[in-house]
Image (spheres, coloured by chain):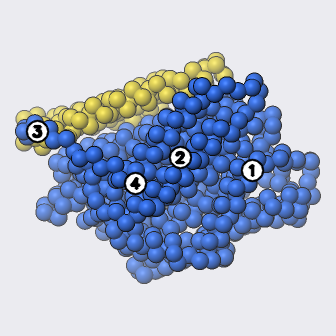
Chain colours: A blue, B yellow
Amino acid sequence: MEMLEFVVPALNVKAILPQLILSLTALTVLLVDVFADREAGKTSAANGLIAVVGVVAALFSALLTIGMRESAYSGMVLADGFSSFISVIICVVALLTVLSSINYQRSCPALDSGEYYCLLLFAAVGMMFMGAAGNLLLLFLALETMSISIYVLAGFRSTDAKSIESALKYFLLGAFASGFLLFGFALLYGATGTMDVVKIGAFLTAHPEVIHSRLLLGGVALMTVGFGFKMAMFPFHMWTPDVYEGAPTVVTGFMATGVKAAAFAAFMRVFFIALGHLQVDWTAIMWLAAFLTMTIGNVVALSQTNIKRMLAYSSIAHAGYLLVGFVAGTKMGQAAILFYLLSYAFTNLGAFGVIALLAKKDGGEYTELKDFAGLGFKYPGMGLAMAVFMFSMAGIPPASGFMGKFYLFSSAIKSGFVWLAIFGVINSVISLYYYLRVTVVMYFQEAEEEVVMPKASPAIVVGLVLAALGVLQMGILPSYLWDLAQFSIKTMIM
Amino acid sequence: MVAYQNLYMALAVVLFIIGAIGAITRRNAIVVFMCIEIMLGAVNLLFITFSRANQSLDGIFMVLFVMAVAAAEAAVGLAIFILMYRKKGTINVESFNLMKW
C-alpha cells in the first residue's frame, strides 16, 4: 500500500467559482423560503428572482474564467476552456428554465417553493462539475448530484399520475444505467490502476499492450451504455418520450438541454482524453449509433400528435446529430458539438417555454398539436417565437440550428465521413415535416376549441426574447461564439 | 497479482448479471430497486478487488462514495414508491402504463 500522507490541497476558489456561486444561491433560496410568509393560494416570484440573480452571477464568472487552464484539487477539477464553456451552456439552461418556471408556477403551485429552485440549481451544479471532472470519482458524484435532483424534479407534480410515472421510470432506469457506468469505471480502474482521466490517457500511452485488453474493452462498452442512457442514444433511448411527456414542462426543457449537454461533456472528456488511443475502435460503433439515433428519432417523431412527445423524439434525433461531431473526432468536430449544444439550449428551452406559456390555471396543459391551431394570428408574438424555434430545430437559416448543423456535418466531411454527413442532411429534410407542421397548424388551421393563453408574466417574456435573440445571434453572426467554442477545445487539458 | 483475484472478479460479474436480470424481469418496484442495489454491490466488490491488485486506495474511496450515493438514491426512490402507492394502491411497475414504454 502507498504511504498515507495527507496533503491539504490548496483552496482554489477561482477554479470552481460558477459552481460555488450556484451552490450558495441554492442554499440561500432554501433558507429564504423558510422565513417567507406568503398569502394562502398565491404564488410569488421571490424564489425565482433570487435564483435568477445567482445564475446570472455564475454566468459572468464562467465567462470571466474562460481563459483559465489549470488542474485544481489534485486533478479532480480541470478548470479549462472546455469546462468554462460547458458552465456557460448550463447557466443559459438554468437561467431560461428559472424564467419559465416563474410563469409556470400558476399552473403548478408546487413549483413555488424553495425546494424546487434549490434542486434545480443543485442539478445545474452537478452538470457543471460533469464538464469539469478530471477524475472518475468526481464525475460519478456530479452525475448523481444531477440525476437525483432531476428524479425529484420530474415528479414535482406529485398528484399527477403521469408525473409520478415519469419520475418512477427515470429513477429506475437511471439507477440501472448508473450501475453499468460504475461497472465500466471499475473495469477501467482495474486495467489502468488510476481514476484520473489525464493519467489514464498517459498510462495507455506508456503501456500500449493494455489498450486491447479485455478489461479495458469491457469497461469502454459498459461506460458507453451508461453515458448512452443519459444522452438518449439509440438503443438506450426508450425512456425519453415517457419521461419527457410526464414531467412538468419546464423540467422537461431543463432535462432535454442540460442533461444532454452535461452527458456529452463528460462523454467527450472521458473518451477523447482518457481513451483517445481507442478512437479507431469506438468510431465505428459511434458511426452506427449516430446514424440509428438520428434516423429513429426523426422517423418516430413524424407520427406524434403530442407536442411534448414529439420534442422528446426530436431530442433523440439531435443527440444523433451531436454524435456526428463525436464520430468526426477532430478539434473542429468537438467545437461543433459545443456550439450545437449552446444553440440547442436556446432553441429547445424557447420551444418548451412557449408550451409552458399555455399552461392552464387549473393545472392542465395544452400539449396536443391541435390545441395550437389558430394561435399564430391570435397571439402574434408567441406565434413568431415558436416559428423561430421550430425553424432553428429544423435547421433553416438564419436560425442557429442551421449553423450548428453546418459545422457538425462539415467536420464529418473533413474527417472523411461523407456518408454520415449525407444521412444527417437527409434526416434534417425528414425533420422539416414535423417541425414545420407545428407552424402550419398555428397559422393555417382553424381552432376546434377556444384556447386562451393566460397573461404571461414579465419573466417568461424576457426568457423567450433572450432565447429568440440567442437563436438569431448564433444563426446570423456565429463567428464570435464559434471562435469561442474552438478556443475552448484548444485550451482543453490533455 | 493477488491470490484469488480472478475469483473475486468472477463473483462480481456473476452478481452484476444476477442484479441486471432481476432488474429487467421483476415487476415489484422495491424488488427492482433491490436488484439495482445488488449491481452496485458487485461494483463495490470489483473496486475493492482492483484496489488490492493495483495497491492503491482510490478504489476504496470510490466504494465509500458509491455507498453514500446509493443511500441518497434509496431515499429518493422510496419517496417515489410511496407517491406511487398513494396514487394507485400498488407498487407494481406494470400498473404505471398511462404512457407506452
Q: Label 1 is placed on what type of residue?
A: Pro
CA–CA distance between discs 3 and 2?
Answer: 38 Å
In the drawing, does residue A468 fall left or right of residue A66? right
Dots 3 and 1 on the same chain: yes
Q: Label 4 is placed on what type of residue?
A: Gly
The residue carrying mark 2 is A54
In the drawing, does residue B9 fall left or right of residue A23? left
Which tag is nearer the camera, tag 4 or tag 3? 3
Q: Residues within 10 Å of mark 3 (few under 14, many from 20)?
A: few
Dots 3 and 2 on the same chain: yes
Which tag is nearer the camera, tag 4 or tag 2? 2
Secondary element at tag 2: helix
Looking at the rendered image, the quarter that the C terminus of chain A falls into is: bottom left
Secondary element at tag 4: helix
In the rendered image, is residue A426 in sight? no
Q: Label 3 is placed on what type of residue?
A: Glu
Q: Residue B11 or A416: which is nearer the viewer?
A: A416
Q: Residue B23 or A447: which is nearer the viewer?
A: A447
CA–CA distance between discs 4 and 1?
Answer: 32 Å
